[in-house]
Image: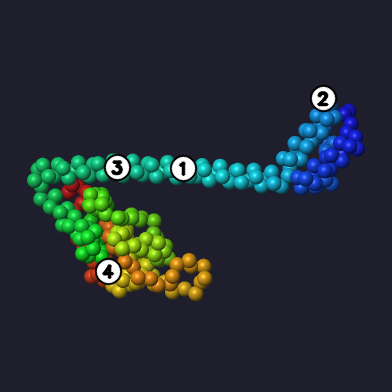
Amino acid sequence: MVKLNKDHERSIKSYCEKFKVDWDLLDYNSFRDNTITAQENLNHIKSIIEDMSEDRIEGLKKVKKKNIKSEKEEVARGEIENIQREEKYTEKEFNKSLKELKKTNSTTIKHYEIPKEYIKSVIKGFNKSFIFIGGAGTGKTYLTRQVLVKHNANFIENRGVNSPLALYIFLYENNKKGLTLVFDDTMGLINNPNAYSILLNVLWEGFAEWNTTSEKLKVPSKFKFVGNIIFITNKLNGENADIIKSRCLIYDLKLTKKDI
């Protein structure tokens, strides 16, 4: 059996102190390998102590978390790329349908001319808000995006705002004159009393307000909103919706996907 002398033990103990490993709990004899020399055993035990150190374990945890985060980000990127590819394909098909309608002089194409003008009026600042209503798959989002891009508009699309507080923060963080905020599928927000109240104040008085005593909110409790808003939705019904409509330009395509 390979023996470790007192000097070896002192060296091991010193190594334990250096790497914050409990000496009393270290059964270093169980790590000995009789097929190698005492010095090789000492080096082997030291490497095990390094692996047992708190810093080493924390480091491994951080690496693991980083790897997990990287994997999640990679999955998220993949999902975003798939959505973008699908959107590009759908937009391509929509544009193709419009070209066919133009060739056949279909009256359907005329339904898309008015919302174009309304969107341009928001871009130019003649109107603060516009509600674009139409059946699913009729190209509302793509038409809106095309007009905004064509006229070099400064705009942000948002589909992830799903709570009153998220809405308030989004409005504050993107509160800029000449910036158009595009909200897609907005019926859920308008049906929420608190979100509806925020939107109504913004559209009616030009101010957004959030009443809270919490010090965790990193935005002011009230601010003047100077941007523009475009709402895109499949339908907009109910008392709240009617009041919101009264403060905006509004256009209903009254078309279905089959019509185009």
Q: Residues within 10 Å of mark 1 (few under 14, many from 20)?
A: few
Contact between labelled residues 4 and 3, with CB atoms less than 8 Å apart? no
Q: Residue at x 44, y 70 (%)?
A: 220
- Of labels 3 and 1, earlier in sequence is 1
- Of labels 3 and 4, earlier in sequence is 3
Q: Amino acid at mark 2?
A: Thr
Q: Which residue is mark 4?
A: 244
Secondary structure at badge 3 equals helix
Q: Which residue is mark 2?
A: 35
Residue 199 in sight here: no
Determine the CA span between mark 2 and mark 1.
Answer: 47 Å
- Of labels 3 and 2, earlier in sequence is 2
- Disc number at residue 75? 1
Find residue 154 and report its horizontal and vertical position in percent: 30, 55
Q: Amino acid at mark 3?
A: Lys
Q: Which residue is mark 3?
A: 88
Find residue 164 and report its horizontal and vertical position in percent: 40, 66
